[in-house]
Image: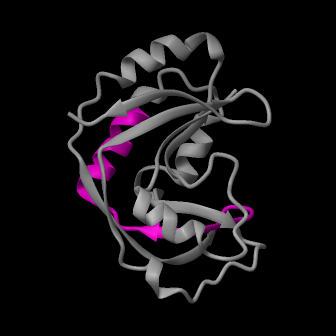
Amino acid sequence: MKYLAYFQPNKELSNLILRQDNIVLPGLGLHSTICFFHMEPKYEKNLVSDLSRINFNPFEIETQDFDNFDKNSLVLKLSRSNELLQLHKDIISTVQNYANSKFNEIARQYFGDNYNPHLTISESSSDFDRTSKELIGRKDIISKYYLAKKPDINWEKIQTYPSR
């Protein structure tokens, strides 16, 4: 089953994005992926418990520019704060104990030095206005992240992890 550790933008930034024309929201809504992976559901309870042991302080992110990501995602690139990179590293270190064999392949492509924080906002094929400067240079404080799973076509939030 597919799992995702992620955070969401604050209400102000979300509202600015959602009032734009031609948005085709991703299935999980507006989100920033910290780590995604595949895992047998039987490990879920242990993973939820282990992730709760990760301590992190709230951190700031800043939107930078629009970009296309993966197959069909329009994103806002985000700053790479040391705190976000440490949280990313801590989550990966925990997840790799439970993830299936596809994890190493995913990790080489998307994690560690290749981690490019971004806020997924729409499908790339949408006519979203990429010239809008009101979404660039927006700051947000991230004080929690979430774990979700995708047992079928819809995502289900499993757990919220607040900062200390």
| Residue 115 spot, x, y in % from top left | 46, 56
Q: Tell me what residue is drawn at x 64 percent, y 16 percent.
A: 41
> Is 87 a magenta residue?
yes
62 lies left or right of 125: left
Figure check: 82 above or below 78: above
Figure check: 12 above or below 45: below
> Is 3 a magenta residue?
no
| Residue 60 spot, x, y in % from top left | 27, 59
Who is closer to the viewer here, 94 or 25?
Answer: 25
Quadrant showing the C terminus: top left
142 lies left or right of 27: left
Q: How is the image coloured?
A: one colour
Q: Tell me what residue is drawn at x 65 percent, y 18 percent.
A: 40
Figure check: 32 above or below 50: below
Q: Tell me what residue is drawn at x 57 percent, y 89 percent.
A: 131
Who is closer to the viewer here, 17 or 149?
Answer: 17
- Dividing the picture into quadrants, the one containing residue 148 is top right
| Residue 128 spot, x, y in % from top left | 68, 78
- Dividing the picture into quadrants, the one containing residue 4 is top right
| Residue 109 spot, x, y in % from top left | 57, 53
Figure check: 75 above or below 25: below
Q: Which residues are magenta?
A: 69-93
Q: Tell me what residue is drawn at x 23 percent, y 31 percent.
A: 55
Who is closer to the viewer here, 127 or 109?
Answer: 127
Who is closer to the viewer here, 21 or 95?
Answer: 21
Quadrant showing the N terminus: top right
